[in-house]
Image (cartoon, helix red, strand yellow):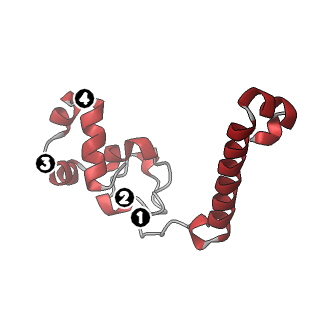
Amino acid sequence: MLALYDEGTLRDALGSGWYDRLKEIVDVREREVERFRSSSKGQVLERQRTKWTDIDVSSGATVPVEALRRGVAFPRGTDARRREDYLGDEEFRRVFNMGREEWRTLGSWKRGELKKEVGLF
């Protein structure tokens, strides 16, 4: 970040003490980012494949909630923002304890909260 600015100009604008503190913060943050990247946490994990991964939902097929939860490879054609659309009516009612008609009357914030609770967000 500090490399974007001329050191002298930045030091004059901030003052020596503030510049040194900012440089220290940036250095610490850069070390943390590098440590994260070199750890296993920084690696992109492959999503777990399921028996539903190869189903194409764009043709109207429905799948169980397990095929749409976080951490699994979604079926082909899935819009991750609207995973609830790929549930059958019975599965939808079981998962959300309401029908689709009632679901549509909820505010988007409430639908988002419910999706988080069941792992579809």
- Mark-to-mark CA distance, 2 and 4: 22 Å
Label 2, secondary structure: give it: loop
Decide which of tag 1 and tag 2 comes sooner along the chain. 1
Quarter of image, res 70: bottom left
Give the image location of residue 11, x and y in percent.
79, 34
- Mark-to-mark CA distance, 3 and 1: 24 Å
Quarter of image, res 91: bottom left
Mark 4 — residue?
107
Mark 2 — residue?
69
Give the image location of residue 103, x and y in percent.
20, 36
* Residue at figure coordinates x 68%, y 48% from the top left: 26
Mark 3 — residue?
97
Give the image location of residue 88, x and y in percent.
25, 50
Of the residues shown, which amino acid type is indicated by label 2?
Arg
- Mark-to-mark CA distance, 4 and 1: 30 Å
Label 1, secondary structure: give it: loop
Mark 1 — residue?
52
Decide which of tag 3 and tag 1 comes sooner along the chain. 1
- Report the disc number at residue 100: none
Report crowding for label 4: few under 14, some 14 to 19, many 20 or more residues within 10 A (C-alpha).
few
